[in-house]
Structures are given as C-alpha cells and as structure tokens.
Image (cartoon, helix red, strand yellow):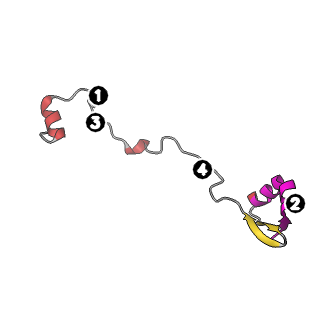
Amino acid sequence: MPSYNVHEAKSNFSKLMKQAEQGEEVIVMRDGEPVVKLVRCPTARRKKVQLGWAAAETRETPGWEKPMIDAEVDAWLGGK
C-alpha cells in the first residue's frame, strides 16, 4: 500500500486517483502519520439501465381506453 506526504499527494492527485480506481489503497500522511486512505468508491461504476424490463409484467385489458360507466366507477371506488 503506497503512502505519500500531503505535498506529493496534491502534486500527483490524478495519478493517485487512477491507482485507487484500479483497486489499490493509497495512504496520505501528514508529519509521518497516516491521515487519509484513498480507495475506490463502490458505487463509482454506473449500472446500465435496461429499458423495458417490465414489459412482460403488464397486461392490457381489452377496452381499457374506453371511459368507465357509472356502475364501474362506483365499484372501483367502493361506493364512495
């Protein structure tokens, strides 16, 4: 696990980020004492969203686009 002092870390931050992205832990030290550990964030990679994943879950009832009659509205609302 490589360690760098604050000045080195500031000067090479992009390099240290690449190391962390590759799974390496990087320690930043102040006055010879470890202060910060730079590690890859577990949510850094975005998952691809699959569109249409629920397409098979929907069922269209024939005539769904037609307005309900009063009796259907009352039954749907439970007599309210």
**Residue at x 82%, y 67% (from the top left corner):** 30
Look at discs 2 and 4 and give the one toward the viewer. Answer: 2
Q: Residue beneath label 2, please? A: 8
User: Magenta segment, which residues?
Assistant: 1-20
| Percent position of residue 4, x then y | 85, 65
Q: In what quadrant of the picture does the N terminus appear?
A: bottom right
Q: Nearer the viewer, mark 3 or mark 2?
A: 2
Residue matched to label 4: 47
Could you tell me which secondary element the residue under label 2 belongs to? Answer: helix
Where residue 52 appears, as percent x and y from the top left, is 48, 41
Question: Sequence-wise, which precedes: disc 4 or disc 1?
Answer: 4
Residue 65's disc is 1
Rounded to the nearest whole Å, what is the CA distance between mark 2 and mark 4?
34 Å
**Label 1 crowding class (10 Å Cα cut-off): few <14, some 14-19, many 20+?**
few
Disc 3 to disc 2: CB gap under 8 Å: no
Q: Is mark 1 on a helix, strand or loop?
A: loop
Q: Is residue 7 left or right of residue 78?
A: right
